[in-house]
Image (tube, rainbow, N blue to C red):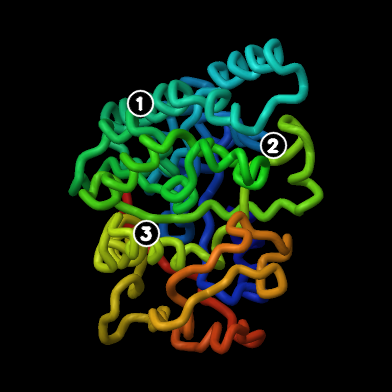
């Protein structure tokens, strides 16, 4: 919790957006999870699959302890590490070290995702925990969730709703991410689940590795991509394609997160609530140009794309944070507050 406060102090001085953080679980910090203040964190993040540093949680007793004792919602990244490692060895035997990026979805496979997410759901039911499964990527996983369920929920990231395996042929390492982008049938099934409510939240997984880092070979290029700047525009593009409605976008990206994480006084346009508002201009297009990117990595997974809409103004906690194509350098977001009854 001390590290959470350190991160919030950094964000308070530098973030133009509102902010909060997950408490990251590990095999070593179960007692920290048990004693965490649920009003101070977005939730407990559990990597039930390979991650950076020591954040892989793969000890059965620790997992059971987290699901039994977490004082707040548990958010899981679900991929089964032994399955991934076995797939990596098979790929090495076939391709050597020159593995094509199109193999990423086979290495970080649908079986690895389903095995891990099924375990998370089973644990949540066993311990009556509140579970949110992050970044769903396969059609099979969707069978684990029901529309309207308030204790076991799932989210989709916009890149998994937009790209599919054929995209590797043109974008390669730029769309290498974990969990991996998979087949068109998976993308289409997830879009349908967003529309019918089995996927209750739309999100992003912003990981802005540098251009040079992304030029490495398969095992050397890090996973992740910059997305925040174009997230809403991408959602609106799918709305233009009749994947889902504007009302669905507002529900899945504003209302549902506020309700799920029990965020205080945000997520709705209501008197007395904080004014967090995005004004969209549907009469103006937005062309993606490297010279107009805000992420420090200065590249985008949407090169040369033109979005149908544009962002006119963004208001953060009552202040104009973005307007006329520029971020207000003096605007600072607020730390998000949570209700204490979140188990």
Mark pair 1, 2: CA separation? 24 Å
Of the two numbered discs 3 and 1 on the same chain, state the one appearing first in sequence: 1
Whether residue 130 is visible: yes
48 w.r.t. 249: above or below: above
Mark pair 3, 1: CA separation? 29 Å
Kind of element beneath mark 1? helix
- Name the foreground residue: 303 vs 296: 303
- Name the foreground residue: 318 vs 288: 288
Give left or right: position of 292 versus 200: right
Residue bearing mark 1: 118
Which residue does the image show at 27% across and 63% down from the upper left?
A: 251
Q: Position of residue 1 (x, y in %)?
A: 57, 53
Q: Determine which of the numbered discs, if any, sits on residue 238 in the image.
A: 3
Q: Determine which of the numbered discs, if any, sits on residue 53 in the image.
A: 2
Q: Position of residue 76 (x, y in %)?
A: 45, 39
Mark pair 3, 2: CA separation? 36 Å
Q: How many marks do you count on the picture? A: 3
Kind of element beneath mark 2? loop
Which residue does the image show at 73% across and 30% down from the upper left?
A: 219
């Amino acid at each position: 919790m001390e590290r959470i406060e350190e991160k919030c102090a950094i964000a308070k001085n530098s973030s133009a957006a509102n902010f909060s953080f997950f408490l990251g679980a590990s095999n070593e910090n179960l007692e920290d999870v048990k004693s965490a203040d649920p009003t101070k964190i977005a939730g407990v993040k559990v990597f039930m699959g390979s991650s950076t540093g020591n954040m892989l949680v793969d000890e059965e007793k620790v997992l059971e302890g987290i699901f039994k004792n977490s004082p707040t919602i548990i958010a899981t990244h679900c991929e089964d590490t032994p399955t991934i490692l076995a797939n990596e060895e098979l790929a090495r035997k076939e391709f050597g070290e020159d593995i094509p990026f199109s193999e990423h979805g086979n290495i970080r496979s649908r079986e690895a995702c389903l095995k891990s997410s099924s375990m998370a759901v089973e644990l949540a039911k066993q311990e009556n925990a509140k579970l949110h499964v992050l970044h769903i990527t396969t059609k099979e996983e969707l069978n684990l969730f029901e529309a309207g369920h308030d204790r076991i929920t799932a989210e989709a990231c916009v890149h998994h709703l937009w790209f599919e395996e054929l995209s590797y042929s043109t974008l390669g390492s730029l769309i290498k991410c974990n969990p991996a982008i998979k087949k068109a049938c998976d993308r289409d099934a997830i879009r349908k689940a967003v529309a019918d409510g089995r996927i209750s939240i739309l999100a992003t997984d912003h990981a802005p590795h540098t251009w040079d880092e992304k030029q490495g070979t398969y095992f050397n290029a890090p996973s992740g991509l910059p997305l925040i700047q174009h997230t809403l525009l991408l959602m609106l593009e799918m709305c233009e394609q009749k994947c889902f409605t504007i009302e669905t976008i507002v529900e899945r990206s504003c209302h549902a997160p506020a309700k799920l994480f029990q965020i205080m006084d945000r997520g709705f346009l209501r008197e007395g609530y904080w004014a967090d508002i995005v004004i969209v201009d549907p009469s103006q297009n937005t062309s993606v140009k490297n010279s107009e990117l805000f992420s420090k990595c200065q590249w985008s997974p949407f090169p040369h794309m033109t979005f149908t809409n544009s962002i006119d103004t963004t208001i953060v906690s009552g202040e104009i944070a973005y307007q006329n194509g520029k971020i207000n350098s003096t605007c600072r977001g607020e730390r998000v507050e949570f209700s204490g009854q979140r188990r």
